[in-house]
Image: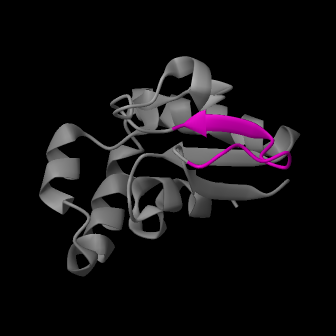
Amino acid sequence: MAGVRVRRVYEEASGDDGARVLVDRVWPRGLSKASAGLDAWCKEVAPSTELRRWYGHDPERYTEFVRRYHAELEEPGRAEALEHLRRLARSGPLTLLTATVRADISHAAVLAELLR
C-alpha cells in the first residue's frame, strides 16, 4: 500500500500528494472549491456532529475519541466510505485533508492510521 498522509486543506498542494481527499463533514471556511485542488470530498467518513462537538479537539479526550470514532466507522455508510479510501490508498499515494488546526489529533489522523 502506498503512503497515506494527513495535511491541512489550507496548505498548498504538493506534487507527491497523490489522491487528495477532504474528509471533513463541513466545507472549510474561506476556501473555494477551485483552489482546494481536491480529487474527492468524502464527508461520509467524518465523525458525527455529536462526536465532533463532544471531542472539541481536546487532547485529553483523544483516546476516548478514537474509541468512539472507530465504533462509528463500523456503521454501514461510514464503513463503505472507509472502504473507498482503502481502495484509493491501495492504488497510490493518498493525502487526507482536513481544516482542523491540530491535524495530528484529528479524525483524519485516525483514518490515516487505519489505512496504513
Residue at the spot 47% in from the left edge and 46% down from the top edge: 98
Colour mapping: one colour
Q: How many marks?
A: 0
Q: Nearer the viewer, residue 23 or 10?
A: 10
Q: Specify whether residue 15 is painted magenta.
A: yes
Q: Specify whether residue 61 is painted magenta.
A: no
Residue bounds of the magenta highlight: 11-22
Q: Is residue 35 above or below residue 100?
A: above
Principal secondary structure, stretch drawn in magenta: loop
- The answer to whether residue 79 is left or right of residue 4 is left
Res. 7 image quadrant: bottom right
Q: Position of residue 78 (x, y in %)?
A: 43, 34
Q: Is residue 96 above or below residue 24?
A: below
Q: Nearer the viewer, residue 28 or 66?
A: 28
Q: Position of residue 19 (x, y in %)?
A: 75, 36
Q: Position of residue 74 (x, y in %)?
A: 41, 43
Q: Position of residue 105 (x, y in %)?
A: 40, 68
- The answer to whether residue 7 is left or right of residue 25 is right
Direction top: furthest residue: 34
Image quadrant containing the C terminus: bottom right
Image quadrant containing the N terminus: bottom right
